[in-house]
Image (tube, rainbow, N blue to C red):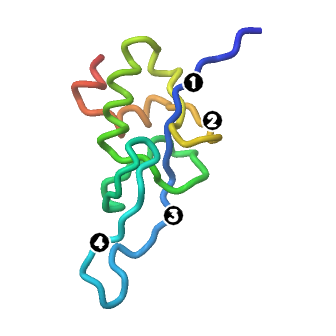
Amino acid sequence: MAARQLVAFHFPYLATPAHREGSTEPEVRECTVCLDQKPTLEFVQITENCPHERNVCSECAQQTLLSTLNGVNWNQLGCMSANCGQVLRHVDMRRVATDEIFEQ
């Protein structure tokens, strides 16, 4: 039985305050793809069924979608988060992809 190829992705969001009490700095976290520290608002939910917080930034999600779609069908894309295993559905692809990427 051939292994199904999935391209990793990630995202349900565990809500956290955008600002800590007494601080004007937005909360940041590290993207697991580019390893940059970015504001939490720049992280996206890839699938509706992911059991983890958002940990891939929007820019990395878009770049991964764009580069992966050249060699894989969109319905073979999986969450980028390690050990997640959730597969993108049409509704997930529509939410995450730019119009240009979605049309491909």
Dots 2, 1 in contact, CB < 8 A: yes
Please state which of the two labelled residues, at mark 2 or mark 4, is closer to the viewer: 4
At a point 43% along the width and 11% down the height, the residue shown is 71
Position of 71 relative to 9 (above/below): above
For marks 1 and 3 on the same chain, the one whose residue lies earlier in the sequence: 1
Residue on which disc 3 sits? 14
For marks 3 and 2 on the same chain, the one whose residue lies earlier in the sequence: 3
For marks 1 and 4 on the same chain, the one whose residue lies earlier in the sequence: 1
Q: Nearer the viewer, residue 13 or 80?
A: 80
Farthest residue toward the top? Answer: 1
For marks 3 and 4 on the same chain, the one whose residue lies earlier in the sequence: 3
Distance of mark 2 from mark 1, alpha carbons? 8 Å
Residue on which disc 4 sits? 26
Residue on which disc 2 sits? 85
Residue 99 in the figure: left or right of residue 27: left
Q: Which quadrant would residue 61 be assigned to in this image?
A: top left
Residue on which disc 1 sits? 6
Mark 2 residue element: loop
Dots 1, 4 in contact, CB < 8 A: no
At a point 50% along the width and 31% down the height, the residue shown is 88
